[in-house]
Image (cartoon, rainbow, N blue to C red):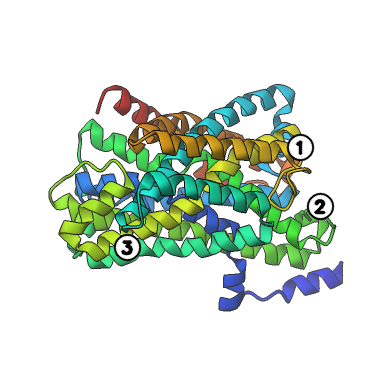
Amino acid sequence: MANTRERARKTPARLGWRGWLKALGPGLVTGSADDDPSGVATYAQAGAQYGYAAVWTAPVVLPMMIAVQEMCDRTATATGETLGKLARRRFGRAGAIVVGILLLCLLVANIVNVGADLMAVGKGMELLGAGPSQLWAPIAGVGLGVLLMTGSYKLVSKVFIWLCLALFAYVVVMFLAGVQWNEVLAGLTFQRLDPNLQFWGLVAGVFGTSISPYLFFWESGQRIEEMRAKSEKGDRPAADTDIPDYKAIRRRRQQRIDVVTGMTVSVLIMFAIIVATGATIGRHPTDINSAADAAQALKPVAGPLAGAVFALGFIGTGLLGVPVLASAACIGFSGLTGKNWGFDRSPRKAPLFYGLLVAGLVVGTILSALFTDAIALLVLSAMINAIAAAPFLIVVLLIAGSRRIMGDRANRALSSTIGWATAAIMAAAGVMAIWAQLSGS
């Protein structure tokens, strides 16, 4: 015991830049996937319609995203189990049925979102002159399906990490847009708020797309897969209590670096999109219904380069977001029912996981081929997510706050306070989004 404490004390206080890069993984991918084409469309609409009025949402949502995703990540490292499996432990049979119904809603919402994101990828290729969107959307769906069915976790995770670089296209666009930074500051300090219901419905949409339930299950699941790949216990991921203290301390530090970096990158991109569209399209308020609309509208006011870079951004994030959307609820269902799951498993060993994954990709690909109006799909998805976000947050909070499950890694006062405040805000945002939608605003 004394030797363990000594080694823990010798654990470096700082990991250095190489250690920081090595720490990046599930948190970065989760944050990047949050900025999928449907999220891009929401942020672009905020900037296009209201200029810098909604830019304050970026710094406000950041601590909430960090707190929620850190909780989801911590449940994985503390227990070695996914949120789905932990929900069954925490709530018993009756509670598991309720969580299962919520997961079914999430699965439907995600499949609809997959269709919209594939449409966005196809439209992006069309804007770059590569051919019709109706061709590229199914190609993207089939290609991603093949990768997920045949690639090992190591290959899939590397592809995801590289796709995260696509996000910085939006930062480039921001610097091409001729931003009035004094006006951005006014937006950040709540001086440009709009009193009408449409504005606050859109703000609710920004919160809803930033803290989406599918990210909770993806963060937890991908962390478990990373732990499996590094496990000294064979196929079983090593929880904090299974490894020496000094290793657990180092892993906790890496986990926090990963989550904070991922959520910061996600919010930086949100900020860049709102600012870039506010500085250009927002000068003459325009209704933006998709990421492709934003790219097209940028061309005459910010130049063809800005439009092309914007399109490249949502093509990359679409290719990243589709697998996350398609697999998140599958991870949850598999854990809830005690079935094998994961990209490091073969389809034969994880039939439920891959069956749901393939069904989601197939239906999403069909939707992308049949529909021409992505906004209809996104509205349906947003409505379902708005209803499900707060209940899923409560599930996460009750798991992460349980000492019986989490031991000494259960939520402390700060995590609990931010978490429950976020749940309340998301419940209000869900009501606001539904009200705005039903009122026709």
Query: Is 358 left or right of 140, judged from the image as shown?
Result: right
Amino acid type at circle 1 is Lys
Vertical side of 318 occupied by 333: above or below: above
Position of residue 268 in the picture relative to residue 21 (left or right)? left
Residue at the (74%, 60%) spot, across then down: 229
Q: Name the residue under label 1.
A: 339
Q: Is mark 3 on a helix, strand or loop?
A: helix
Tell me the distance, in whole angstroms, between the alpha carbons under discs 3 and 2. 43 Å
- What SS does tag 2 mark? loop
Instruction: First in sequence, mark 3 or 2: give its number.
Output: 2
Badge 3 vs badge 2, beta-carbon distance below 8 Å: no
- Residue 254 in which image quadrant: bottom right
Discs 3/2, front: 3
Q: What residue type is labelled 2?
A: Arg
> For the point 58% across and 52% down, which residue is it?
70
Q: Farthest residue toward the left?
A: 284
Query: Which residue matches tag 2?
Result: 236
Tag 3 residue: 309
